[in-house]
Image: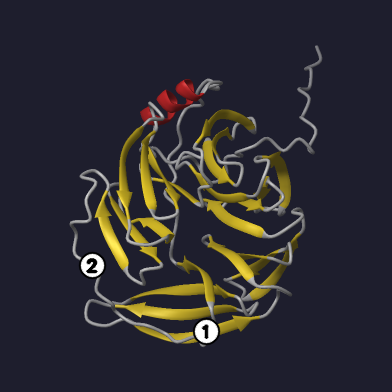
């Protein structure tokens, strides 16, 4: 039986496009499902969770769409400037970055901003959440790569990379991450925070995606999608085969995949002592890199809610 997923794309024309795609071994078929014009400027970022799709724009807003009810779910107004990046952590939290240098952490229950972090002196160009939900990486136009402890919302490590990176991504296992500067992919090890390899593309890289913990898909201005093995640091894999295409007649800027049947696996684990340094964080995360945190675990404590006082039992 063919699986069904939905491709959601943003465009310079301010419109979000949705295409329902049916997949099987022989042929992938797609048909238009919706178009939505909620922004007043070009769409710059899109992300999808199990239930919601969110789009960010140069109009400084984040628009919410409930994909199960197929209705608008409102807008988030916290950034002053273009929304540059969006990423869900499971189904419980959304992180957003913008030209104002802020990273905002949102709860998807009531869509409240739990924390607003002044992350970079310039724009935030990209962010990525560790699979554990305890750590995040960000890069910006201040030529720094920053590591964030999401349990307290504080900076854990700052690395001067001397150039403006525009993409950062964790590997699925969370034991390494990649940083993209123009046409170069640099691979880092989590435990040592040191460079373990580099890969150079023919032209500027515009998008990357880990397919598994070692295979990275890379797309850029050379108009091709390449697969590379980051473990061997070689472009030795065959290029992917085209299964289908759609002409939207628009200039697309970003893409996300919404899977109606996607359910995050939840495994409970005992609470660990809070790590305070980047080395402690790395060691703790490497120990638990294969364990999924419960979807409803709060990444950052909601300071707007008063803590419950313990009731004293009367004699």
The image position of residue 312, as x and y in percent, is 79, 17
Is residue 104 or residue 125 the one in the foreground?
Answer: 125
Provide the secondary structure element on which disc 2 rests: loop
Residue at the (55%, 53%) spot, across then down: 88
For residue 73, the mark is none
The image position of residue 79, as x and y in percent, is 74, 54
Mark 1 or mark 2: which comes first in sequence?
A: 1
The image quadrant that residue 283 belongs to is: top left
Is residue 91 or residue 174 the one in the foreground?
Answer: 174
Q: Quadrant of the C terminus?
A: top right
Q: How is the image coloured?
A: secondary structure
Q: Residues within 10 Å of mark 2 (few under 14, many from 20)?
A: few
The image position of residue 81, as x and y in percent, is 73, 57
Question: How many numbered markers are drawn?
Answer: 2
Q: Residues within 10 Å of mark 1 (few under 14, many from 20)?
A: few
The image quadrant that residue 158 belongs to is: top right
For residue 33, the mark is 1
The answer to whether 247 appears left or right of 112 in the picture is left
Q: Which residue is mark 2?
A: 239
Give the CA separation, mark 1 to mark 2.
Answer: 29 Å
Residue 104 in sight in this render: no
């Amino acid at each position: 039986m063919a699986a069904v997923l939905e491709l959601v794309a943003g465009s310079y024309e301010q419109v979000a496009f949705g295409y329902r795609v049916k997949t099987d071994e022989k042929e992938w078929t797609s048909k238009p499902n919706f178009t939505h014009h909620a922004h007043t400027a070009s769409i710059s970022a899109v992300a999808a969770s199990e239930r919601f799709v969110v789009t960010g724009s140069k109009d400084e807003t984040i628009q919410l769409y409930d994909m199960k009810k197929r209705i608008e779910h409102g807008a988030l107004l916290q950034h002053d400037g273009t929304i540059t990046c969006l990423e869900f952590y499971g189904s419980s939290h959304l992180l957003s970055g913008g030209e104002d240098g802020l990273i905002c952490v949102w709860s998807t229950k009531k869509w409240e901003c739990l924390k607003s972090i002044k992350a970079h002196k310039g724009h935030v160009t990209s962010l990525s959440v560790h699979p554990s939900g305890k750590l995040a990486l960000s890069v910006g136009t201040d030529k720094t790569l920053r590591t964030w402890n999401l349990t307290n919302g504080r900076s854990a490590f700052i690395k001067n990379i001397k150039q403006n990176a525009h993409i950062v991504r964790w590997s699925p296992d969370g034991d390494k991450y990649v940083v993209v500067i123009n046409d170069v992919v640099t691979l880092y090890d989590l435990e040592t925070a040191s460079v373990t390899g580099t890969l150079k593309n023919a032209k500027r890289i515009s998008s990357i995606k880990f397919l598994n913990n070692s295979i990275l898909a890379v797309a850029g201005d050379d108009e091709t999608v390449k697969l590379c093995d980051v473990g061997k640091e070689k472009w030795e894999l065959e290029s992917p085969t085209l299964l289908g295409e759609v002409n939207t007649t628009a200039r697309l800027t970003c893409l996300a995949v919404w899977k109606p049947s996607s359910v995050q696996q939840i495994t409970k684990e005992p609470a660990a002592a809070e790590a305070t340094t980047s080395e402690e964080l790395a060691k703790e995360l490497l120990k638990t890199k294969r364990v999924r945190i419960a979807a409803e675990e709060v990444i950052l404590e909601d300071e707007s809610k008063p803590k419950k006082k313990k009731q004293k039992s009367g004699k």
